[in-house]
Amino acid sequence: MEVFLQQLINGITLGSIYGLIAIGYTMVFGIIGMVNFAHGDVFMVSAFIAVITFLIVTTWLGIGSIALALFICLIAAMVLTSIWNWTIERVAYRPLRGSFRLAPLISAIGMSIFLSNFVQVAQGPRNKPVTPMLTDVITLIRSDIYSVTISYKQIMIWAVTAVLLMGFWYLVQKTPLGRAQRACEQDRKMASLLGIDVDRTISLTFVMGAALAAVAGVMYMVYYGVVSFSDGFTPGVKAFTAAVLGGIGSLPGAVIGGLLIGLIEVFWSAYFTIDYKDVAAFSILVVVLIFMPQGILGKPEVEKV
Amino acid sequence: MTEPLLAVRGVETYYGNIIALKGVDMDVHEGEIVTLIGANGAGKSTLMMTIFGSPRARTGRITYAGVDITKMPTHEIARLRIAQSPEGRRIFPRMTVMENLQMGAAIDDFAHVDEDLDKVFALFPRLKERIAQRGGTLSGGEQQMLAIARALMSRPKMLLLDEPSLGLAPLVVKGIFDAIRELNRTEGLTVFLVEQNAFHALKLAHRGYVMVNGVVTMSGTGRELLASPEVRAAYLEGGHH
């Protein structure tokens, strides 16, 4: 029981990070029908931006407050990663719009390789550690054999994720910007007939996806305390799995899928073997694609044509 | 003769290598109701969409209110206050009726949504009952009303209607055509109407064009076309007289 509870806490934390990345996949797929394979690497870039910002803020500027430093990291990572992703869309995807379907996909794979290589060359191939932070824990169940704890950083990850997801949900559901975004997702041509600048809306989608991936990047840095140029691939593909599991195109689906993948991975590691945790996650992808290709929340209602 | 509000000159449109419009000339003057009739596949809807630059005219020239819009991006054309209720209605299926209507007012940043809602609900009371329902769950007729109402929400100077009578009960069609006539008379709304229902369309319109295989073959006032033997033979026989 104690082990179960502890793994539940760990799994939700990891799942929050996957969910944040998964939203970027699902939104881009929803609006232009493309799997943005570079999204995992955008997340990795954001983690690097977070590490660099953190070092600048704490070492050079000498800001002692961890909370303030992380807040600055979060803002810097969100802004800079958004600019990155906006540029990627302009350079690598927009010129290929209207081309054959595989073209932007191939371009995305190329962009993924470019990003990880660029970071490898610019930042070096070694892991970049940051000083451990928010390491204090709250003991929930005290026991001689196995105590259940939740760390401050886990609480922070939950809280930041929850607040940002609510803000994001409000943005998409209630604001004119979100309305235009959903309209483009459902019928791009009609949206343009109504005066919506579809290209601009697609750019904004990439910006939103990148901002959430950047939140995930900061959380990742805090949680693991180390980032590497190759960190884009595995979390990226897992987040993609989460998006497919939740039903690609569905925003709540991405969050649910992310949480499920996080939980599956953590429980698998705890109860079976940690060596096969990635295999477990990707087996889910295969099983979902075969038996439930629309995912948990994919396209719920029958539409009249 | 004043400058037409919408002028189409020698427009050719292709789908890939297949030619759909073979040099179309057409005018719509301010305050007019003009109809374009023709059989299935004649190119009527293609012309509607070509006016909006999607697909784009390969040759020829389209001007609206004196502005050359042939190469203008689609969303900028819409911002000149031409609205379209397109072929297939194109309702946003996973948005509510309310949200669909709000999208109609997107070019004005949703500024006058509330007052205009009352207007379109007066026109189509049915939509008010459905306000919180998703567009995709409406019946065909309701979707048609929603498509027209959405187009009106942008306060258009000119309204393009693609087969508004399609799939609707005769009484509803009459309601819609009455509404168009009313908007034209009281607000001076210019209307360009594509119809297969030639009888009603020609009765409503001031002028009409007949399109066959991507070419305009005849034009005249609504009355002239209704009286023309060719039009009667091709589009009106078997219909109501």
Image (cartoon, coloured by chain):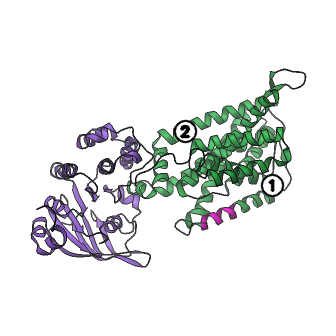
The chain ID associated with circle 2 is A
Label disc, if present, on residue A169 of the rendered structure: 2
> Looking at the picture, does residue B189 appear above or below residue A174?
below
Residue A268 in percent (x, y) is at 79, 41
The residue pinned by badge 1 equals A123
- Give the residue type that dot 1 points to: Gln
Q: Is residue B225 visible?
A: yes
Q: Quadrant of the N terminus of chain A?
A: top right
**What is the spatial separation of the Cα atoms under label 2 and label 1, in whole angstroms?**
35 Å
The chain ID associated with circle 1 is A
Colour chain A appears in: green
Disc 2 is placed on an element classified as helix
Residue A132 in percent (x, y) is at 84, 36
Magenta segment boundaries in residue numbering: A102-111
**B229 magenta-colored:** no
Letter of the chain in purple: B
- Give the residue type that dot 2 points to: Trp
In-front residue for pair B125/A63: B125
Does residue A9 appear left or right of residue B36 in this picture?
right
Q: Name the quadrant containing residue A57.
A: top right
Does residue A124 appear left or right of residue A13 in this picture?
right
The reply to the same-chain question for discs 2 and 1 is yes
Q: Name the quadrant containing residue B117.
A: top left
Mark before the other along the chain sequence, 2 or 1: 1
Q: Can residue A45 be seen in this view?
A: no
